[in-house]
Image (tube, rainbow, N blue to C red):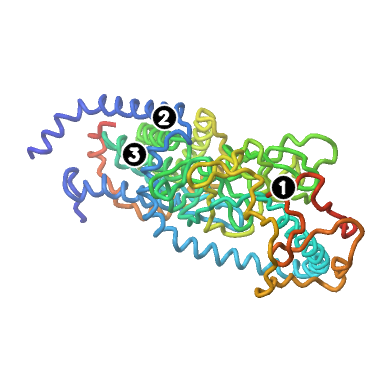
Amino acid sequence: MRRHGLWASLKPLLGPISNGVFVLLILVAVILILDDHREDRSIIRGAFDDAVVPVMDVIAAPFRGLRAVLSDLDGYTEILNKNRNLKEENARLKQWYARAQAQASLLRRYEALLNLKLDPPVDTIAARVVTESGGPFVRAKLTNIGAAHDVRRGQAVITEHGLLGRVVDVGQNSSRIILLTDTASRVPVMVARTDARGMLNGDLTPAPRLDLIRGADMVRQGDMILTSGDGLLMPRGVPVGQAYTARDGSWRVRLFTDRGPGDFVKILKSTDFAAPPETKDGEEVPLLTPAAPIPANPTPRFDTPAPEPTPLPEELEILNQPTPGPRPQAAPSAQPVPDPAPNAVAPGEGPTPEPVLGPMP
Amino acid sequence: MKKKAHPNSDLAIINRWLMPVVACVLGLGLVALPARLGAQPVPMPIVPLIVIYLWAMFRPSAWAGLVIFCLGLAHDLLTFGPLGVWTAIYLITFATVAGLRRAVLGRPAVTLWAVFALVAVIVAGLAKALGWLAGVEPSERLLALQLLFTVLLYPPVAFLLRPVQATSMEFHREDPL
């Protein structure tokens, strides 16, 4: 056979060539390993992810459904144990809620008076997780939105439970999120109770390590861990998890995001939490921003009813009783501001917050 | 008696090329599936490793390296792992098994399975070493679990890939590798 004859004559040559090809390919692979920085190959990885997203979306669909069912079942098994604790917690929280309502009411009045723009909200983009890498090298998720939706590298990603990770790679219609449990994840955090600063380091275990906490008794079992905002890449105060001591004595954080399947995420659009927000024409907004100028002699409008105040529980009726010292004024729409003051209230001239309630338990 | 396919017949080409490649691609899809048990990710078996082992053992080919390189690269990209690690592991596995196949061929299937388990141990060591080269320390527990699942999955995958293993010894003697 002619074809076979040609093949047979080529075979002695192919031996050394194929060996050479193999050695060359292995060398190329090793060069790739030595040169690889997962976050510096956006073009290759981004293009590949774009191509993979629709395929994996279909393949992984049954797994997503199954995972949601398993997650529900997992939740049911804990219901009995949690029910008792929740009842006790609920009773405590009701007291806290009442106090928080009172504080919130007071805060609203102060904000209306001072026109302070506090902690401006960050725009978010919702994304669906298409697939997830759970191998021995990496913890990452692939989402179905990318540069076309204004996703950029470094943006923080949250779920309804708390911080999930950050964007490390962006394609046109896909983006990779590296999770807090990945070895490449380093997030500055703080202990909510003590404000002690630390670093949350992923090590491919389900609970990342909490390092660099200084001082004695700065962190306790069950302490809530939040992002500290240090490094200015993430907002301050995003819930991360609860601290606990591992068997080896190290502090670890049980992540809040493990409470749900995490199929839907929100990507925070900003990557710089140092600069104040900008207006549409690029002009910076000062932190003390008058929402609306207060007229010098505002005329009370009696034709529009004043907004209904949030009903307070009976035990908090104390708020409605006169207290010694200056009391905050009601909302400008309800009562006129007697002082024809400028936009912001100067320090010392405004109403001094009075401790309405005793210290919280 | 059943007639064996000629090395250059269409059937032989399907057995030699198409079947392993398709099996590897499907296996990669399995590796990339987002399996979780509660909050814990469940490592999926590395089916391409089984296919590459059988491919190298029964149907080694001069140019398989290029295909395996692409499959390894796809594995790294799919799992967002350090680029080149699984590429190198697949290539080294293929070359090693192809070099040792004459000592193993013709033995019972259980022996082939045992040799595959040994290959899995070597792969674990390679993954650890190459991960260290890439600056990413792999999770030993997950790596061990993943390879254990792979070894356990060997018999059914080998059964499904019988056409790859149906070989003629003359054909092997002519093989360049």
Kindly indicate the quadrant of the structure image that contains residue A99: bottom right
Work out how far the residue at label 1 is from the one at label 2, CA to CA, in angstroms: 37 Å
Dot 1 falls on a residue whose secondary structure is strand
Dot 2 falls on a residue whose secondary structure is helix
Q: Amino acid at mark 3?
A: Cys
Q: Is residue A279 left or right of residue A296?
A: left
Disc 1 chain ID: A
Q: Name the mark nearer the viewer: 2 or 3.
A: 2
Q: Amino acid at mark 1?
A: Ile
The location of residue B17, given as percent across then percent down, is 26, 45
Q: Are marks 2 and 3 on the same chain?
A: no
Location of residue A192 with respect to B65 vertically, above or below? below
Work out how far the residue at label 2 is from the one at label 3, CA to CA, in angstroms: 13 Å
Residue nearest the viewer, comparing B161 with B17: B17
Q: Which mark is residue A225?
A: 1
Q: Name the mark nearer the viewer: 1 or 2.
A: 1
- Picture residue at 56% right of the left edge, 57% below the top: A262
Residue nearest the viewer, comparing B23 with B75: B75
Q: Name the mark nearer the viewer: 3 or 1.
A: 1
The location of residue A274, given as percent across then percent down, is 61, 38
**Residue A157 visible, this orientation:** yes
Work out how far the residue at label 3 is from the one at label 1, CA to CA, in angstroms: 43 Å
Kindly indicate the quadrant of the structure image that contains residue A249: top right
- Picture residue at 63% right of the left edge, 45% below the top: A235
Q: Which mark is residue A32?
A: 2
Location of mark 3 (residue): B70
Disc 3 chain ID: B
- Picture residue at 47% right of the left edge, 53% below the top: A131
For this orientation, the residue located farthest to the right is: A324
Check disc 2: other Cα within 10 Å, few if <14, some if 14-19, many if 20+: some
